[in-house]
Amino acid sequence: MLFNSIQFLVFLPIVFLLYWFVFDRFVSKSKCQLRLQNAFVVVASYVFYGWWDWRFLLLIAFTSFCSWGSGLLIGKAESKKRARMWMVLNIVLNLGILALFKYYDFFVIEFAQLFHLSAEGCLLKVILPVGISFYTFQALSYSIDVYRGKMEPTKDVIAFFAFISFFPQLVAGPIERATNLLPQFLKKREFDYDTSADGLRQILWGLFKKMVVADNCAVYVDQVFSTYSVQSGSTLLLAAIFFSVQIYCDFSGYSDIAIGTAKLFGIKLMRNFNVPYFSRDIAEFWRRWHISLTTWFRDYVYIPLGGSRVSKAKVIRNTFVIFLLSGFWHGANWTFIAWGAYHALLFLPLILTGRNRKYTNPIAEGRYLPTIGEFGQMLLTFFLAVFGWIIFRAATVSQAWEMMVGLFDRSLFTLPMMMVGVKRTVFAIVVLVLLEWINRSKEHGLSIGNLPLAFRMVTCYSLILMILELAGHSQSFIYFQF
């Protein structure tokens, strides 16, 4: 079920009304109220997830049960060695399932090509379950945190299943930590009008980013990337910029809708994007981009490897490990690995010189505009990210290279190819940038709850009209494929 679909438009209000006015009000005197409400969350989430393919439900239920059971076994273990064994078994099981569905065919094909063999008879050709990379990492965080003693294992299987399958963030994150999300299913939630109103504004903001900005950018991007060999350098550059905006608005738009929807149910999810294109260097960019994944790799891979408190050689190793893993997490394609390596190379000088934490405050804090120097830093960081997105979007590494070479052709200084809808797309991007710049220190681009009612209504209705009038052709969210 897509967030930008009629089905979800019907599904969400029904679930909301049942959640608050049936399982919260009419059974409020029952000792089982919380468990019934959590059970309803699980049922609603499974309906939401099963909308794509009911067979996916068997896999997520198996992952949930094994991870819940591993937590109990870790908690009851008589020794640290035995607890570690149960944790490792759960990690191997979950990563094994992920590897089977996501990477098996890739490795078989690469092995066959290396030795000039036929891979046809060995391929599984299975459908990649939607969101498997997200909920697998969420399940892993639970068993690891229980083993580390950061939380007690829960005996409440219903609350645990709700934690893994909570429908707003089930398919494309944010990748929640058990320490943050699970406790919220273990205590009574209270309806809060202001939080819900802000959630609705955040949903609206996410829909604008997805339907107006990302989907309009996609039309130009798809056309140029499919015919890149005959396009001018200026056209390739514009397509690369549009894709950088598209993937940001597509993914952060999903996160905004997910976080906003969770607020309607009294659940607080972590922030996943924090205006990353306003960053002053690539380290700041990665603190602001897909925060739930980058912090996951930091806490569960980078720091256990020694982080930056080891020798320079190991710092280099650790940096490449997390960026290559981040690239490989996105999919079984050499382009993703090359994209990860590219960012590792950009990040390495900053971490080796200790400047990776230089910019932790919002840009132009307390000012309306950035300085010329800050603007130059933002521009440089943005275009470094743009080149990375060319690698990410290309079908092959060779295509990415050919596009980059074509970019620096003399035709770079000509006018790019124009298509119907380009002006509309540029207008939408301008609106996006203005609202995100104004609210860069706040949670999202429509964090206007403290402003006069008339202003809030005009702003929200204007965005609704833009969605109705300017929305591009509906497309699936990019990160569904991961």
Image: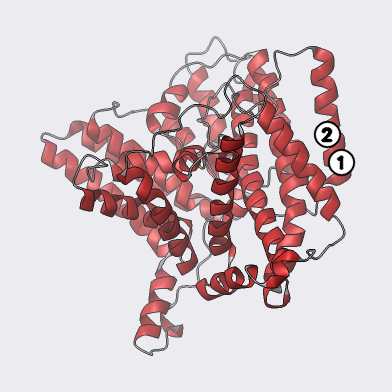
Q: Is residue 184 visible?
A: yes
Estimate how packed mark 1 is, as few (under 14), some (14 to 19) or many (20 or more) residues with alpha carbons within 10 Å. few
Q: Is residue 232 left or right of residue 184?
A: right
Measure how far apart labels 2 and 1 are at the Cα level: 6 Å
Residue 422 position (above or below residue 301): below
- Figure check: 376 above or below 241: above
Residue in the image at 24% along x and 43% along y: 87
Residue 64 in sight from this viewpoint: no
The residue lying at 67 percent from left, 14 percent from top is 194
Do the residues under discs 2 and 1 have CB atoms within 8 angstroms?
A: yes
Residue placed under numbered mark 1 in the picture: 468
Q: Which mark is residue 464?
A: 2
| Label 2 CA crowd tier, 10 Å (few <14, some 14–19, many 20+) | some
Residue at the image point whose x is 69% and y is 24% from the top = 17
- Tell me which colouring the rendered structure shows: secondary structure
> Closer to the camera, 441 or 352?
352
Location of residue 265 (image quadrant) = top right
Secondary structure under tag 2 reads helix
Amino acid of disc 2: Ile
| Residue 183 drawn at (x, y percent) | 41, 23
Q: Which quadrant of the view contains residue 298?
A: top left
Task: Looking at the picture, tell me which residue is in the foreground, 478 or 334.
Answer: 334
Q: Position of residue 102 (x, y in %)?
A: 45, 62
**Mark 1 element type:** helix
